[in-house]
Image (spheres, helix red, strand yellow):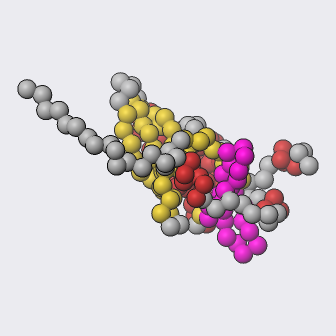
Amino acid sequence: MTNKKNFDLSGLDDSMDLELLPVEIDHIVVNPDKRVYVVLTDEERQNGVELNPFEASHLSFVHKGLHKNSHIQTLHQLYVKTLEQINSKIESVVIESKVGDVIYCSIKIVDKNHNRFFTIVSLADGLILSNIAESPIHVVSNVWENMDPIDEWDYEDYILDFDEDDDEDE
């Protein structure tokens, strides 16, 4: 005997745009008021999200690649190494929800048998784990549209993760 369940999907709002857009970290900046932002880009638009100084310094540390030669492992590195030890990896990070000023990410983890499971983390943790695991970052398009775009302030003067290579572009 099989128990079939029928779901009435007629009441669903299909106008929600749930397409996943690839994004990447453009820069980490500190404005004149000493507020720290991560600038995310999808090549067409740039959005800024404020981070607390602790999260921002940790994200900058891994975004610059300094964690690769560090003699002390961070908790994020230990998490990724533990996943590797059990033959699992972070497949992707999805920025999937914005509630007020809080942004949530889901981490998709896959094991050696192709079983997938998810966990929800903060934006900063998702970006840090994505950097360490070298996994792609995506954002749900309606969330991306509701995030704060970078306005016309000249944030290049305040870049925290500025590389000398960036200077050659000018």
Left or right: residue 78 versus residue 30 is left
* Quadrant in the picture for residue 21: top right
Q: Position of residue 143 (x, y in %)?
A: 54, 53
Q: Residue furthest top?
A: 113
Residue 144 against residue 2 in the figure, above or below = below
Left or right: residue 143 versus residue 66 is left
For residue 29: magenta?
yes
Q: Position of residue 141 (x, y in %)?
A: 56, 47
Q: Is residue 143 visible?
A: yes
* Quadrant in the picture for residue 134: top right
Viewer-closest of 67 and 120 = 120
Residue occupying image coordinates x 47% and y 40%:
80
Where the N terminus falls, by quadrant?
A: top left
Q: Residue furthest bottom?
A: 33
**Residues rendered magenta in the picture:** 28-50
Q: Is residue 129 visible?
A: no
Viewer-closest of 33 and 95 = 95
Residue occupying image coordinates x 72% and y 46%:
44
Residue 52 against residue 2 in the figure, above or below = below
Q: Residue furthest front?
A: 10
